[in-house]
Image (cartoon, rainbow, N blue to C red):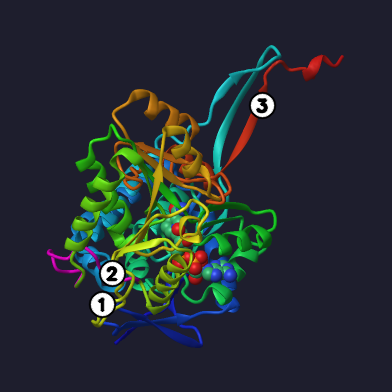
Amino acid sequence: MNNYNNIIGGKEVKSKKTFTSFNPFTEQPIAKFQASNIKDVDKAVSAARAGYKKWSKIPAPKRGEILLEIASILKKRKLELAKLESTEMGKILQEGLGDVQEAIDIFEYMAGEGRRLFGHTTPSELKHKACYTVKQPLGVVGIITPWNFPIAIPAWKIAPALICGNGIVFKPSSDTPLCAYKLVKICEEAGVPKGVINFITGSGSEVGTPIIKHKKIDGVSFTGSRSVGEFVTQNAGLKKVGLELGGKNPIIIMDDADLKSALDGVIFASFGTTGQRCTAASRIIVHKNIFKEFEETLIKKVKKLKMGNPLKSSTNIGPLINRAAVEKTHKYTEIGIKEKAKLLCGGSSPDTRGFFYKPTVFTNVKPNMRIAQEEIFGPTTALIKINNIKEAINIANNVDYGLSSSIYTNDLSNAYLFIENTESGLAYVNAPTIGAEVHLPFGGTKNTGNGTREAGIEGIHEFSETKTVYIDYSNKLQKAQGIR
Ligand code: NAD
């Protein structure tokens, strides 16, 4: 089994202890990684500071050329990396390919930002005075990521952080460190100077917390669970914080919807990535007129989904990330049954090796039940019956989260009522809750985050400061606000 090191200041560095990453399908170990500590974090921060000083002086369009090179290497190695995702994280190969493609897309998009990084100009209230703004790097940023998009999520953060000129301390999830290591090596190979990206593995408490609290880190970009997100805001002090947290995403299906496409959308959004997407649909809010038909057809389709080896093209559903995820999903099955929701299918693990859980559908679900309120992050979805669009939107909004929401309808008023009133950062019409594109902002309202957005132009805001510039060429003291 290979032993992987931290990468600090461009050098491979060991810590005192190691941990092991596992294949969730075979349950076998994959590789060993450094179980780093606060001292390693300090070293990584110093190296990132030195890296930032060099990197931020390289003109942004030149930085962009290196980002394009990263995209180009990712393209060449797309299949190899997707297979690694299937092996280390368990997502099916098609989704692994999509994950790597998202990384390619964001590096290409952010490479282009190197030739923009737009500030704005505006007239002064005084004569002979120019005013404009410029974007500047934050300095050193801490990047902490989950395991469910093991290459795309790090890329969504590393690409804008790099184009803005920051130095980086990157801590990936301990469930998918190998995918993250490969991405960092590709960045180095593409020409990112040594010390700009510092890769450090280890637990949330030993490595993540010191990053969040570190006095010499200027910004933290965190994607993960709501509870850790809250911990981040409480402990980051005054540094800039970007948070992308959980979801409890609804799909509304009205009686005028195209049922076939709605069913396909529900299957993809509820069971794709084995339900382990922040945008997974876990509440299906269906109009009473079509409820029975929808429920019956859905169950037929769900029963045909094939669980198995994520590398096999015939597999629809891969394993969950680890044993704890299986236990958590099952705990919610028991909660659902206790709450008197009706279990239509699934509800247990198959009798096979691997961290599998059968695709699970509950019906007769009431909006305030825990299975309709809390993020399960497994292949479990809940059917809720509604009478009209207003009730549907109220129920859709009746959760703490606000990441993604969707409606299937062919009625323009239903669609617009939904768009206007849904309390979520992403709103889809006649498409499922998943399917983000990198040139649009991504993020949520309410307890899904703190209002920052990733990707698109807003991804730049998270990793930069605005400097406002005034140039007075009047050769005399001029005072704003009319002061004489
Ligand atoms: P998690 O919160 O357990 O871990 C995320 C990262 O934080 C990991 O690297 C972990 O090691 C680190 N961490 C854990 N405790 C920490 C601490 N005390 N201090 C600092 N760092 C700490 O989440 P997870 O299980 O890896 O990911 C699943 C969650 O991520 C789900 O809630 C999902 O909805 C969310 N997610 C959100 C988005 C989004 O864009 N909104 C995308 C993907 C996943």
List the single residue furthest toward the right. Answer: 484
Which tag, 1 or 2, sits closer to the chain's start?
1
Which tag, 2 or 3, sits closer to the chain's start?
2
From the viewer's side, name the closer residue of 475 and 408.
Answer: 408
Amino acid found under the numbered disc labelled 3 = Tyr
Residue 190, horizontal then vertical, whole percent: 31, 57
Q: Which residue is mark 2?
A: 358
Left or right placement of residue 9 versus residue 43 in this view: left
Amino acid found under the numbered disc labelled 2 = Lys
Q: Quadrant of the C terminus?
A: top right
Q: Main secondary structure of the magenta part?
A: loop
Reply yes or no: does residue 319 show up in magenta: yes
Q: Quadrant of the N terminus?
A: bottom left
Secondary structure state at the residue bearing disc 1: loop
From the viewer's side, name the closer residue of 200 and 123.
Answer: 200
Which tag, 1 or 3, sits closer to the chain's start?
1
Left or right placement of residue 398 versus residue 1 in this view: right
Q: Which residue is mark 1?
A: 350
Q: Quadrant of residue 19?
A: bottom left
Residue 405, horizontal then vertical, whole percent: 41, 43
Q: Which residues are magenta?
A: 309-320
Relative to 410, is 23 above or below? below
Are there few (<14), some (14-19), or many (20+) residues within 10 Å of tag 1? Answer: few
Left or right placement of residue 38 versus residue 95 in this view: right
Secondary structure state at the residue bearing disc 3: strand
From the viewer's side, name the closer residue of 422 and 59.
Answer: 422
Q: CA distance from mark 1 to mark 2?
A: 7 Å
Residue 317, horizontal then vertical, whole percent: 24, 65
Label 2–label 3 contact, CB within 8 A: no
Q: Nearer the viewer, mark 1 or mark 3?
A: 1
The label on residue 470 is 3
Tell me what residue is drawn at x 64 percent, y 62 percent: 216
